[in-house]
């Protein structure tokens, strides 16, 4: 059973990755000897997995379940306050545990509630989407949205443990699964050439959601993320590399209205845009671009933008990126598989030409 440590001095934790493990009773240490648990989830995920999760909790514990609507809009101040009210009414204390059962929406919201209830209570991530299993459940970013933008109110708050059961992905729809694969491909490109080759070799098993292959794939992603987060928990330096393709992606999501593009779909095109820029400036060989494009295509992720996208709006939205330094864009650019760099970018005319090249002709 693969297990990855996120090494963070006084708040290190394990990420346990085992297929069909959701209902298996855990060692007491996994549940921190808590006697009170709140499972935060949504109806769709609860119908599929709540019963299994309940089986794994200590039999003498008090458990409440709180469901939130299945939408990005749940990362809101209203849901945040509603959850706090329910937990305080149930007399939750700092030693009680909040369990996030679901995708990144549930994880980000429940994590921010856990970070703020009595200034921080126990927090367990049980991610059930591929994106959440390889990215959002590990690393401690928690947040809700504000009317002016996504994830603007939040904190770094690490979970006590992350429990991943890759077999939960069997019920995830193809589009969401593919979106998670964009983040998987990203890890190969930023950190690990061998992993990128492994993905290519195992792509059929991955597409067929073979349990053992998924355990290995998710464990490799989590260990790459764990190493980056251990070195730079609060994103003052190398953690920014996890944002390959994301400056383009956030802008595309932002101007299209959230939900039109799934995050991973926008990341796929964003990585291609970043890679094309690198090739056209002789920082990366064209053969690496084609390798990236092949993988993205194999997993049915988009290779192009849509005709509706307005290039000026994309560029304006890129200037809202949190990573920007003064007025300059900071782009994470691939150099070769396993190596990416952050570069300041000022040439807007070039960006215009680059993005236009990704819009299909009418
Ligand atoms: P999501 O949480 O909206 O889940 C996608 C859909 O899949 C939902 O309808 C959900 O109910 C459903 N679902 C979940 N598990 C399922 C399963 N096993 N079977 C069937 N259906 C299932 O989307 P997501 O992509 O997981 O997360 C997106 C969110 O994550 C965004 O809010 C984004 O900002 C955030 N995020 C956070 C981080 C971070 O580091 N904290 C990183 C990336 C993204
Ligand atoms: N999803 C990018 C990060 O956690 O830093």
Image (spheres, rainbow, N blue to C red):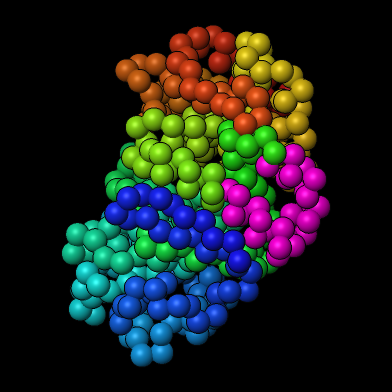
Percent x, y for residue 230?
41, 44
Quadrant for residue 268, please give it: top right
The reply, left or right, for residue 2 in relation to residue 163 is right
Q: In the picture, residue 280 is in which quadrant?
A: top right
Q: Nearer the viewer, residue 311 or 185?
A: 185
Q: Main secondary structure of the magenta part?
A: helix
Residue 292 locus on image (x, y percent): 71, 32
Boundaries of the magenta span: 195-221
* Residue 263 percent coordinates (x, y): 55, 44
Q: Is residue 144 visible?
A: no
In the rendered image, residue 276, in percent from the top left (x then y), is placed at 66, 20
Vertical position of residue 117 compared to residue 218: above or below: below
On-image quarter of the C terminus: top right
Q: Residue at x 53, y 29 (%)?
A: 248
Question: Residue drawn at (36%, 49%), measured in percent from left and top?
Answer: 8
Is residue 329 depicted above or below 248 in this figure? above
């Amino acid at each position: 059973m693969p297990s990855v440590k996120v090494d963070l001095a006084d708040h290190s934790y394990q990420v346990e990755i085992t297929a069909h493990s959701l209902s298996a009773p855990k060692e007491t240490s996994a549940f921190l000897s808590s006697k009170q648990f709140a499972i935060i989830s949504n109806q769709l995920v609860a119908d599929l997995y709540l019963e299994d999760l309940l089986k794994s909790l200590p039999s003498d514990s008090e458990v409440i379940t709180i469901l939130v609507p299945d939408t990005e809009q749940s990362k809101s101040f209203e849901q945040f306050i509603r959850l706090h009210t329910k937990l305080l009414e149930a007399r939750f204390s700092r030693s009680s545990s909040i369990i996030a059962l679901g995708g990144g929406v549930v994880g980000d919201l429940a994590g921010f509630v856990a970070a703020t209830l009595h200034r921080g209570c126990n927090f367990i991530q049980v991610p059930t989407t591929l994106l959440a299993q390889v990215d959002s459940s590990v690393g401690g970013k928690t947040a809700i949205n504000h009317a002016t933008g996504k994830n603007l109110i939040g904190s770094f708050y690490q979970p006590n443990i992350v429990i991943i059961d890759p077999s939960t992905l069997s019920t995830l729809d193809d589009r969401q699964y593919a979106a998670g694969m964009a983040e998987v491909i990203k890890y190969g490109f930023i950190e690990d050439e061998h992993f990128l080759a492994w993905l290519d070799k195992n792509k059929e098993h991955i597409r067929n959601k073979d349990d053992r292959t998924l355990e290995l794939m998710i464990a490799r992603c989590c260990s790459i993320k764990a190493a980056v987060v251990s070195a730079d928990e609060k994103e003052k330096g190398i953690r920014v590399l996890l944002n390959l393709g994301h400056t383009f992606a956030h802008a595309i999501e932002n101007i299209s209205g959230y939900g039109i593009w799934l995050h991973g779909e926008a990341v796929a095109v964003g990585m291609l845009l970043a890679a094309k820029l690198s090739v056209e400036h002789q920082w990366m060989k064209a053969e690496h671009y084609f390798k990236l494009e092949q993988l993205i295509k194999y997993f049915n992720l988009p290779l192009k933008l849509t005709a509706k996208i307005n290039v000026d709006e994309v560029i304006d939205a890129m200037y809202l990126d949190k990573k920007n330094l003064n007025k300059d864009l900071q782009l994470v650019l691939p150099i070769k598989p396993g190596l990416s760099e952050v570069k300041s970018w000022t040439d807007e005319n070039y960006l215009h030409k680059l993005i236009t090249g990704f819009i299909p002709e009418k």
